[in-house]
Amino acid sequence: MRRFFASLVQWIDSDYSVESPDAIRAQPDGVNLVRCIPFIILHLGCLGVIWVGWSWFAVWTAVALYFLRMFAVTGIFHRYFSHKTYSTSRFGQFLLALWTGTTVQRGPLWWAYHHRHHHQHSDEPEDAHSPHVHGFLWSHIGWITSKRNFPTDYSKVKDLAKFPELVWLNRFDIVVPVLFATGLFGLGRYLEHAAPGLGTSGAQLLVWGFFISTTFLFHGTASINSFTHLWGKRRFNTTDDSRNSFILALVCLGEGWHNNHHRYQSSTRNGFYWWEIDPTYYGLKLLSWTGFIWGLKPVPASIYEEAAQIAHHDTIRRFSTSSVQHEINTLRKVVPTAAAIAIATVNSPEVASQLKKDGPAIHKDVAEQTEHPGTDQQ
Ligand SMILES: [Zn+2]
Ligand SMILES: [Zn+2]
């Protein structure tokens, strides 16, 4: 019963617990159903569309909020709080943290702690969301319902934990999502009267802008944990099974270049080449021109050289295993057959007697044949 009430309190205060965070983390994986009720409500809220219907305004709001908040996940949670691939002011950092709050993916310190842990133990038993260790479903959604993954290990994110405003947002990670959802509802109510031509309402914007958009956002983000360690190509021979995927780069604004990222985490860009589409990087580049952020970290020349070497060896290997190997295989089949035909022909009684009579064909004078064209008919 104590644990039941503790889970209820944790809906509001993420750091509240009856046991020490270390003891909770040491427990085996197990779903904390009570703690997950808000997450279940988020999914069930999508069913509200049955009652509120749709309008173009609501649908486009959902789409816009998906991409604006995916940018917050990739450009801020990931490339700023987890890897510090660029710099900003303390106030700028606070604004970025507020933006990530609208994603409903818990606090910046919790997110960064888990992500850094993933890089330290990628695809090892310690990795909380490796599809190779725990299976696809657990890596996609199961791991965030597990009680041992709820506490933030502040000792692993000391660089962020020194800012009380970030710790507060991390601890009370429900505040921004509630304000965001309320704001959407209020906007819908306002537009209902101020712009009735849009055909929207408070409840409709809440369902489309918050529940549907956020549920898609969660699964888009989760696909990086699940799919990008299963699907796609590997450029770099990293110790994990991370992969590069163009499709996931579109869905997740550039995060699909996950193998690149696992090879070199400190770069602001995940798409290392112009053809590796990385909208998050383009957005961050734009922001840097305003002076709001600065110090975007590039991909070092040594990494490009490594990639060029791999591409070079890959070309040679593919050439040898495709065209050359194909020719070798063909020769292996053809030569014994040709040899067998030749031996059989040479050993046949007619050819043997002809050879004895005429000697080897190569010693025959070619002019002999052309001088007496009608010999066969005689
Ligand atoms: Zn990964
Ligand atoms: Zn990362």
Image: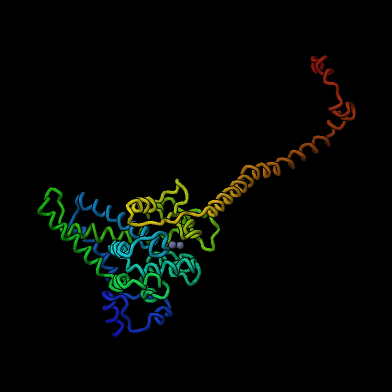
Q: How many marks?
A: 0
> What colouring does the structure picture have?
rainbow
Quadrant assignment for the C terminus: top right
The foreground one among 13 and 96 is: 96
Q: Nearer the viewer, residue 354 or 172?
A: 172
Residue 40: image quadrant is bottom left
Residue at the image point whose x is 48% and y is 72% from the top: 126
Instruction: Residue 345 in the image: state x and y as whole percent.
Output: 80, 35
Residue under the point 29% across and 85% down: 2
Q: Is residue 36 visible?
A: no
The image quadrant that residue 145 belongs to is bottom left
How far across and how far down the image is residue 7, in percent?
29, 78
Q: Is residue 40 left or right of residue 324?
A: left
Ligand number 1: quarter of image = bottom left
Q: Position of residue 185 (x, y in %)?
A: 17, 61
Please, is residue 344 above or below residue 376 in the view? Answer: below
Residue 178 seen in the figure: yes
| Left or right, 332 with reference to 81 | right
**Horizontal side, residue 302 vs residue 47: left or right:** right
Q: Residue at x 36, y 73 (%)?
A: 162
Identify which residue, 213 or 84, lies in the foreground. Answer: 84
Say which quadrant the N terminus sits in: bottom left
Of 80 and 324, nearer the camera is 80
Direction left: furthest residue: 193
The picture places residue 354, in percent across and down from the top left corner, at 86, 28
Residue found 29% across the figure and 60% down from its top: 214
Left or right, 233 with reference to 112: right
